[in-house]
Image: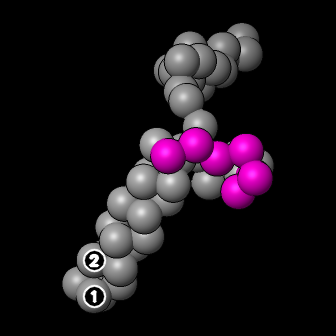
Amino acid sequence: MKKKNNSNNKFNKNITPDGLDVEYSAELADHEDIEAQERSAQADARVKKKL
């Protein structure tokens, strides 16, 4: 008998992308987008500092 592959059942289909591969256009960015980019850069700097 063949075993069923249950790995497909464990996969969460509601996973949202982490945003790293999302296209970003500075021309279309609003104030909130710019603030989010600044927060992201600050968070990246903190992570690099810890390493």
- Is 22 included in the stretch rendered in magenta? no
Q: Are marks 1 and 2 in contact (CB under 8 Å)?
A: yes
The residue under the point 27% across, 77% down is: 46
Q: Count every numbered label the image shows and give the total.
A: 2
Q: Nearer the viewer, residue 11 or 51?
A: 51
Q: Quadrant of residue 20?
A: bottom right
Secondary structure at numbered mark 2: helix
| Residue under label 1 | 49
At numbered mark 1, what does the secondary structure look like: helix, strand or loop? helix
Whether 32 is drawn above or below 43: the answer is: above
- Residue segment shown in magenta: 25-31
Looking at the rendered structure, the kind of residue marked 2 is Arg
Q: Amino acid at mark 1?
A: Lys
The question of residue 26 being in magenta is answered with: yes
Residue 13, picture quadrant: top right
State the quadrant of the C terminus: bottom left
Residue 45 position (above or below residue 9): below
Foreground pick, 32 / 24: 32
Q: Main secondary structure of the magenta part?
A: loop
Q: Which mark is residue 46?
A: 2
Residue 49 image offset from top left, x and y in percent: 27, 87
